[in-house]
Amino acid sequence: MELEGLFTPAAEERIGIEVECGLVDDRLGQSAPYDGQCGSRALLERVRHELGAEPINEAGALVGVELAHGAQVSLELGGAIEYSSPPFRSLSDLVATTRHDLRAIASIAARSGLALLPGGLVPFTPRERIPWAPKPRIDIMRRYFQGLGPAAAYAENVMGLTLSTQTTVDYVSPEDFREKLALLVKAAPIAAALFVNSPIEEGRPTGVLSRRMQMWGYVDPSRCGVLGFAVRPDLSFADVVEWGSALPMIYRRVGTGYVPGPERPFRELVEHGFGDGTAPGLDDWRGHLSQVWPQVRARHTLEMRAFDGPPWEALAAAPAFCVGLAYHAPARRAALALLDGLTAADLAQASEYVAVKGLDAMVGDRSVGGTAEALLGLARQGLRARAVAGLERADAERLLDPLDEVVRTGVTFAERAVSDWTGSLRERPAALVAAGRVPFA
């Protein structure tokens, strides 16, 4: 089996987004259970019938729906709602469709006293009350992480409570892959400072700006964090294959269910099989690459995973930032020049510091805030150039305005959230949910 075969350049550049929102009751802000009239299964059933969606089932349980235009609404492991868009050629069209769909789902949820709550962390649900979705692989994953001990101390919090807004971009050639992956990996922990938005855990400010980023630092470092090889100038598909194939599978699909993966590197399974007379195929390789969670995940697309989910009004800032930097060659190369010289160790350390200090952190000997501001300017140039070329609406660059506000004031989404929580919201969960939920008609 040729493992590099999964890394096939696309015919054109398109954009996708995944938006994770807590599904919470609107009074206490606690995560909704799966069962019951006010549970996530009932919500998916209503979305299915009211929006004409097709069901997605696992082991006989409804865990998602697919809308007519290809978007999917599914349960995350801990019961949050994930909206996954189809790919779009235009950022503007992507954002318009995503906003429309999320508002429609939020409206259906509101009739049952539920809210879709964007952000970086479900703020009121304690770890011991995570409503795990009925997905068979969850128990396998939990046992795997428990077996790692301190190296995965926050795995269950990450699986069940963290939220993000992820952007997928395409690459159209091996050289394009190299440039875009290097750019996104180097930019990820720096740009994440513009998006920090998870300062509240179990109803209390934690003293850090991104509890989500901090917890990700304690989840299996062999599968998560910075792709260190991406800083090398000779980066290629083979590096991703080498990295991924050195890891064991956490689980694999057998028939309609899942079983734990063998405790051997994937490359050994390719050579010697699973030990039951079968050998891995391309679907197993695809499944294996879904069991790694670096800040940027490389598969048939490149997926930026480093950002906390922003507030609703800044929803479009994450894909706008990625598209502006990655899809305009002059901006992309200027950003690579700006980030030149950063090491994997610099990026890993910055990830740790940004979680606590945000824009005040350092990356190597450089200011995270100053570097993030420069990257933001390049992203704006990229969007402006795409608009001039007729690839975006003329006002596409305005999608970055919320990030300009962060840079101008020096106040991150997280700092604003804590100020509101201890001030005007008077530490009332219902008030936080009302202020931060996805709006509905």
Image: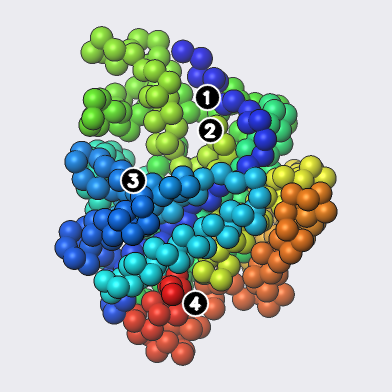
For label 1, the SS is helix
Residue type for callout 2:
Arg
Viewer-side label of 2, 4: 2
Q: Nearer the viewer, residue 370 or 258?
A: 258
| Residue closer to the observer: 411 or 392 | 392
Q: Can you tell which of label 4 and label 1 is closer to the viewer?
A: 1
In primary-sequence order, the first of circles 2 and 1 is: 1
Answer with mark 4 or mark 3, whichever residue precedes in sequence: 3
Residue that badge 2 annotates: 299
Q: Is residue 12 left or right of residue 285?
A: right
Would residue 29 appear left or right of 380 to someone viewing this image?
left
Residue under the point 52% across and 63% down: 99
Give percent across and percent down for residue 61.
21, 45
Classify mark 2: helix, strand or loop: loop
Q: Are marks 4 and 1 in contact (CB under 8 Å)?
A: no
Callout 3 secondary element = strand
Residue type indicated by callout 4: Ala
Mark-to-mark CA distance, 4 and 1: 41 Å
Location of residue 177 by image quarter: top right
Q: Residue under circle 3? A: 54
- Mark 3 vs mark 1, foreground winner is 3
Locate residue 362: give its quadrant: bottom right
Classed neighbour count for the residue bearing mark 3: other residues with Cα under 10 Å, few (<14), some (14–19), many (≥20):
some
Residue tagged 1: 6
Q: Is tag 4's residue or tag 1's residue first in the polypeptide sequence?
A: 1
Residue 178 % position (x, y) = 68, 32
Give the residue at mark 4. Answer: 417
